[in-house]
Amino acid sequence: MLVQLRKFEVEKGYSDQVVENFSEESPVDQFAGLIDRSVMVNKRLKDHEEVVMMIRWQSKKDWKNWEKSDVHLQGHRNNKGKERPSYILNVEVKMYEVESYHKGKN
C-alpha cells in the first residue's frame, strides 16, 4: 500500500474552503487501485489551520499509473498558470509505503 499525504497550511478561517474543494467527486475516485481519500482538519493551531488529504493506493504501481494518466495530466494542464489562493500559506506532499497494517476487529 502507498499513502500520499498533502498538508495545506491555511490562514485562520479558510480551512473549510480547502475541505470543500477536495471533498467533491474527482476523476481519481474512479481510478483503478485507489483505496480511498480522506480530508482531515486541524483548527486548534494558534496562528493557522491545517488541512491534510490522505490518499491511499493499493500499490506504488497504481499511483504511478494515475500520475501518468491522461486525465491526471490534463488536470494539471488546465490548472497551469493559475495562482494558488493567497490564504494557502504552504503545501507539503509526502509519500509513504506501508510496511505494516493491522485491521481492527470491528
Image (cartoon, rainbow, N blue to C red):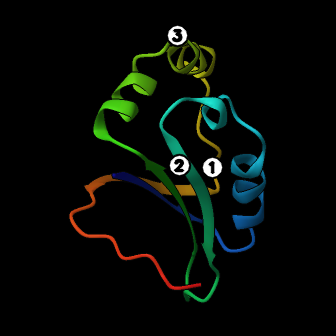
Q: CA distance from mark 3 to mark 2?
A: 20 Å
Instruction: Please say if the residues under marks 3 and 1 sit with CB atoms less than 8 Å apart.
Output: no
Q: Is residue 9 above or below residue 86?
A: below
Q: Amino acid at mark 1?
A: Ser
Quarter placement of the C terminus: bottom right
x 47%, y 15%: residue: 69
Q: Secondary structure at mark 3?
A: helix
Tell me which numbered mark, 2 or 1, is placed earlier along the sequence: 2
- The residue labelled by disc 3 is 70
Tell me if mark 2 has few (under 14), some (14-19) or many (20+) residues whose alpha carbon lies within 10 angstroms of its own.
Answer: some
Q: Position of residue 57 (x, y in %)?
A: 43, 45
Q: Amino acid at mark 2?
A: Ile
Q: Which mark is residue 86?
A: 1
- The residue labelled by disc 2 is 35
Tell me which numbered mark, 3 or 1, is placed earlier along the sequence: 3
Q: CA distance from mark 3 to mark 1?
A: 29 Å
Q: Secondary structure at mark 2?
A: strand
From the viewer's side, name the closer residue of 32 and 90.
Answer: 32
Tell me if mark 3 has few (under 14), some (14-19) or many (20+) residues whose alpha carbon lies within 10 angstroms of its own.
Answer: few
x 77%, y 40%: residue: 25
Q: Position of residue 65 (x, y in %)?
A: 39, 23
x 55%, y 86%: residue: 45
Of circles 2 and 1, the one toward us is: 2
Q: Position of residue 38 (x, y in %)?
A: 60, 60
Q: CA distance from mark 2 to mark 1?
A: 31 Å
Tell me which numbered mark, 3 or 2, is placed earlier along the sequence: 2
Name the quadrant containing residue 14.
bottom right
